[in-house]
């Protein structure tokens, strides 16, 4: 039952309000002084407080401030017989939800209570969703017990409380963005924005505008002034994914921002400051790109103040059972299903796959299996894999001993026929010979051909 505390020194008024509220189904507690009201607030723990301004011991506004100190989310509706602007302003500034004038209009009171409880429910829901979202990026939710992942956890813990730039390197699908979010949401600036930019998905001109913003008329489509991601990020984190794909021109501008902590909008003249932390990620070997002259060495060292290398899934197969359990929990929650059983032969199969797409590929495979499952068990046939083709025994096409040219030709044609599974059409295309010529050589060399076409 929803509880309401009424703090009102006039016993007739408080009893009248109490009777009305009880008829509406509320549980009601009464207090006649400010101190009694504060004590009742702690003991009764109401969902809402109806508070009179004029009390015999302490001012109602002081009671409001003390309640807000104890619980900043408390819903307090102020009542007074004195309708003056100064008191109204003070009450709202101190955190009152609404300000009602006595004698009370009970229809207005009911509407105010409904609105207050709806808003409170919405705030609680939003707070819950934010909490749940942040839980996704706690270190506990990055799964792995392998030595490589333990090193990653240590690095996240070490760097989270600093403002140092971080470079995350790893293959596609290893969870670079997840690690970046774990760093951000475990930092003192977790309530600041976390902004993601995929550098490979945006053209160079647009990327510069995305990062720094632009003024009106800076280019053809710049009809209004926009804020860039550096400005929006504030003291938060700017995550630059696929940093290895940005142009030399943009590399120079990014280096300047990192060094000076200031920038200008595209087409602008005003210098703006940034306090954002930069976390960059790439699936390229940036050191190799530096050696090839494709990436600035000074920018590379500015970005990799702290470097985190994420291992591919094939190098930490011991983590797959824990990952499967975690991902199935997540997938079932999203799809509102209950498919959680994984037979030992299916788990063994999952642990032997190459996982070129890493954790992302594993998650997609499990999602498909959950969708197709008829019961609560993951079956092998529901996993999106073709059986591995039989390994063709490796052979030396060009023999080590010296042999006639026709012998080399014979071996190579046989090799192509086996590779194309007997498809003469494909073999002709690869060998760049006609079909009659291929048929003649098959006959002359007595070659074996699988029936295909």
Image (cartoon, helix red, strand yellow):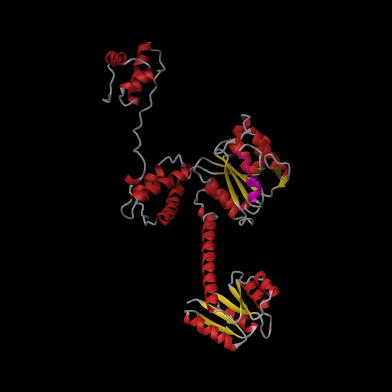
Q: Is residue 26 left or right of residue 291?
A: left
Residue 236 among those drawn in magenta: no
Residue 149 visible from this viewpoint: yes
Q: Is residue 389 left or right of residue 266?
A: left
User: Measured from the top left, where is residue 224 in percent x and y?
Assistant: 63, 44
Looking at the picture, tell me which residue is in the foreground, 362 or 14. Answer: 14
- Relative height, residue 1 to residue 176 (above, below): below
Q: Is residue 222 left or right of residue 414?
A: right
Residue appearing at x 68%, y 76% in the figure: 84
- Relative height, residue 85 to residue 313 (above, below): below
Residue 43 visible from this viewpoint: no
- Corner quadrant of residue 253: top right
| Magenta segment boundaries in residue numbering | 221-233
Residue appearing at x 68%, y 71% in the figure: 89
- Relative height, residue 120 to residue 161 (above, below): below
User: Measured from the top left, where is residue 283 in percent x and y?
Assistant: 54, 39
- Corner quadrant of residue 241: top right
Q: In this view, which residue lies farthest toward the bottom?
A: 12
Q: Is residue 421 left or right of residue 159?
A: left
User: Measured from the top left, where is residue 231 in percent x and y?
Assistant: 66, 48
Q: How many marks?
A: 0
Residue appearing at x 43%, y 55% in the figure: 334
Looking at the picture, tell me which residue is in the foreground, 5 or 301. Answer: 5
Q: In this view, which residue lies farthest toward the top?
A: 404
């Amino acid at each position: 039952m929803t509880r309401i505390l009424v703090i009102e020194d006039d016993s007739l008024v408080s009893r009248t309000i109490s009777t009305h509220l009880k008829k509406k189904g509320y549980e009601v507690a009464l207090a006649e002084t400010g101190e009694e009201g504060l004590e009742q607030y702690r003991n009764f723990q109401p969902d809402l407080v109806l508070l009179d301004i004029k009390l015999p011991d302490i001012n109602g506004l002081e009671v409001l401030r003390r309640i807000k100190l104890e619980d900043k989310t408390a819903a307090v509706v102020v009542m007074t017989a004195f309708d003056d602007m100064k008191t109204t302003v003070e009450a709202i500034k101190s955190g009152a939800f609404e300000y009602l004038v006595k004698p009370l209009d009970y229809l207005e009171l009911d509407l105010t209570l409904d609105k207050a409880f709806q808003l409170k429910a919405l705030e609680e829901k939003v707070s819950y969703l934010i909490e749940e979202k942040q839980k996704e990026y706690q270190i506990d939710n990055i799964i792995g017990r392998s030595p490589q992942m333990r090193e990653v956890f240590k690095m996240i813990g070490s760097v989270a409380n600093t403002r140092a730039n971080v470079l995350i390197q790893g293959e596609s699908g290893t969870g670079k963005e997840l690690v970046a979010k774990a760093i951000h949401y475990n930092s003192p600036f977790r309530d600041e924005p976390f902004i993601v930019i995929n550098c490979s998905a945006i053209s160079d001109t647009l990327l510069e505008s995305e990062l720094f913003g632009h003024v009106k008329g800076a280019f053809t489509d710049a009809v209004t002034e926009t804020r860039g991601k550096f400005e929006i990020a504030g003291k938060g984190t700017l995550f630059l994914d696929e940093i290895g794909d940005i142009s030399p021109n943009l590399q120079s501008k990014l280096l300047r921002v990192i060094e000076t902590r200031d920038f200008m909008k595209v087409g602008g003249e005003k210098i703006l400051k940034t306090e954002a932390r930069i976390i960059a990620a790439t699936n390229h070997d940036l050191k190799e790109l530096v050696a090839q002259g494709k990436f600035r060495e000074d920018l590379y060292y500015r970005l990799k103040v702290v470097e985190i290398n994420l291992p591919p899934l094939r190098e930490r197969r011991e983590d797959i059972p824990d990952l499967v359990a975690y991902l199935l929990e997540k997938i079932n929650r999203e799809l509102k299903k209950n498919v959680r059983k994984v037979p030992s032969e299916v788990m063994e199969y999952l642990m032997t796959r190459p996982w070129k797409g890493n954790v992302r590929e594993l998650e997609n495979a499990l999602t498909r299996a959950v969708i197709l499952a008829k019961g609560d068990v993951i079956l092998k046939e529901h996993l999106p894999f073709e059986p591995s083709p039989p390994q063709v025994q490796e052979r030396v096409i060009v023999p080590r001993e010296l042999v006639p040219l026709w012998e080399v030709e014979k071996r190579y044609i046989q090799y192509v026929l086996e590779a194309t599974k007997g498809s003469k059409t494909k073999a002709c295309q690869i060998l760049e010979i006609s079909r009659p010529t291929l048929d003649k050589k098959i006959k002359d060399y007595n070659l074996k051909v699988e029936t295909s076409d």
